Amino acid sequence: MTRPLTPRQQNVYDFIVKTMNELGYPPTRAEIARALGFRSPNAAEEHLRALDKKGVIRMVAGTSRGIRLANQEIDGGADETDGQANNGLPIVGDVAAGSPILAAAHIDRYCPLSPDFFSPRADYLLRVRGLSMQDIGILEGDLLAVHRTNRVRDGQIVVARLEDDVTVKRFKRQGHKVWLIAENADFAPIEVDLRHQALEIEGVGVGVIRGGNGQALN
Amino acid sequence: MTRPLTPRQQNVYDFIVKTMNELGYPPTRAEIARALGFRSPNAAEEHLRALDKKGVIRMVAGTSRGIRLANQEIDGGADETDGQANNGLPIVGDVAAGSPILAAAHIDRYCPLSPDFFSPRADYLLRVRGLSMQDIGILEGDLLAVHRTNRVRDGQIVVARLEDDVTVKRFKRQGHKVWLIAENADFAPIEVDLRHQALEIEGVGVGVIRGGNGQALN
DNA sequence: ATACAGCATGGAATTACATCCAGTAATGGT
DNA sequence: ACCATTACTGGATGTAATTCCATGCTGTAT
């Protein structure tokens, strides 16, 4: 239904996404023009109208930087809201490569905590393996509260699946490259090229719980 | 240096996060003013400056909607903080010197979590101040699950009241001397002589929760 | 040939915004 | 008593930004 974007339109769109990722807000017409080499902001305006007509962005009239991405994405899609019955939050242990995180086989037990205690809502608790996030107080054995979504921003703590391996890291993106950054000087950042490697974002970290039934604080 | 957002500043910050989630770009001064009921955009401007000075946002001079979240957090979600759940763990905020920990005045709200999730049972959650326990992953703003007791053993994490000040430390005793030991090389152990100083043990730490709707994870 | 999108320049009107200045008032600490 | 914050009202100014208009150059389908 959406006719393909022309190369120039793609450039404009890419610049909008890049700007929003790096600055946190969309560019103005003038900024687009400057970045793409137009001498008139009107060139940008007309590209925006084309992008709006093709449905990939939505313009907000009369509003500075009033550009919204129609389908927010790293992978595509939106927040899932599978309404599962409430026994509490499922606690997910070791996730086997290649299988879905919430497969019943991985669910150790349930934590009797309301998902809404965290914001955004937590969908499950993932038991953390390794020390890669210890500098921000996420230790081996901790439960990471995870909100299922693939809409992430630079700087967030994400649960990512890279080539079938599930890992918790800080997320940073630039164009087609993503860095998965550990919070521990002993671990080097992982650089991912989205053109050649399969990266899926399983969710974002929204909280941490330690000491759940059993292991101690020490 | 970043300590406390005032309630009003928190409102402004929440509105910024909410706007960015819903619209994809930050609000203008006028929009903040309208949302919070100010009659002048200058009120919003001054709150933004305060938030900038406290480090939670960064302002981009001369730029419309030039507001960036410093500690990335998205999906701020709904405004309702409370709502239900009286049968959870009370969350205790700043404890005034000399008053009992569980005095109603200190109870911010309740966490809908079963006390038995921790072992031994948690009686309340204490919001941690300061960085003295950061090396074992207990950070500023975390909720420490506390079991009320005054029977403690060496090496446990305790909530102690020393001369009317409430503090979280690791406990060690030898005869009439007690050491309250921080888990942070920048803090020296506190030596207490039980013959001359009043030390009360309020309880032991049995768990940690981070991210409980008061943001964190950064 | 002649339309019609894509891709631009250049100019200009009109808002939308950030930001400065001068006040008022309540609070809490020294 | 005094000063520093917090928390605003009200108004003003200049620039940042959207958006309209006129114009022209390409290709490629009609």
Image (cartoon, coloured by chain):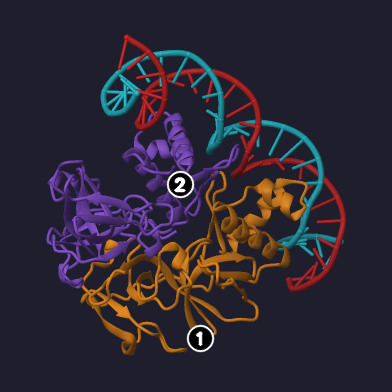
Chain colours: A orange, B purple, C cyan, D red
Secondary structure beneath dot 2 equals loop
Q: Do tags 2 and 1 sit on the same chain?
A: no
Among the 4 quarters of the image, the one containing residue B75: bottom left
Please tell me whether residue B73 is drawn above or below residue A140 in the rendered image: above
Residue that appears at 66% across and 59% down: A15
Q: Compare residues A165 and B185 and report the one nearer the observer.
A: B185
In this orientation, which residue lies closer to the viewer: A130 or B69?
A130
Say which quadrant the C terminus of chain A sits in: bottom left
- The spot of residue B180 in percent (x, y) is 28, 55
Q: Between marks 2 and 1, how big is the CA–CA gap?
A: 36 Å
Looking at the picture, how far across and down is residue A202, in whole percent? 44, 75
User: Which residue is denoted by mark 2 in the rendering?
Assistant: B56
Above or below B183: residue B25: above
Is A152 on the left or on the right of A147, as rendered?
A: right
| In the image, residue A104 above or below residue B190 | below
Circle number at residue A164: 1
Question: Which amino acid type is marked by label 1?
Answer: Asp
> Quick one: which residue is furthest to the front in this view?
B175
Displayed quadrant of residue B112:
bottom left
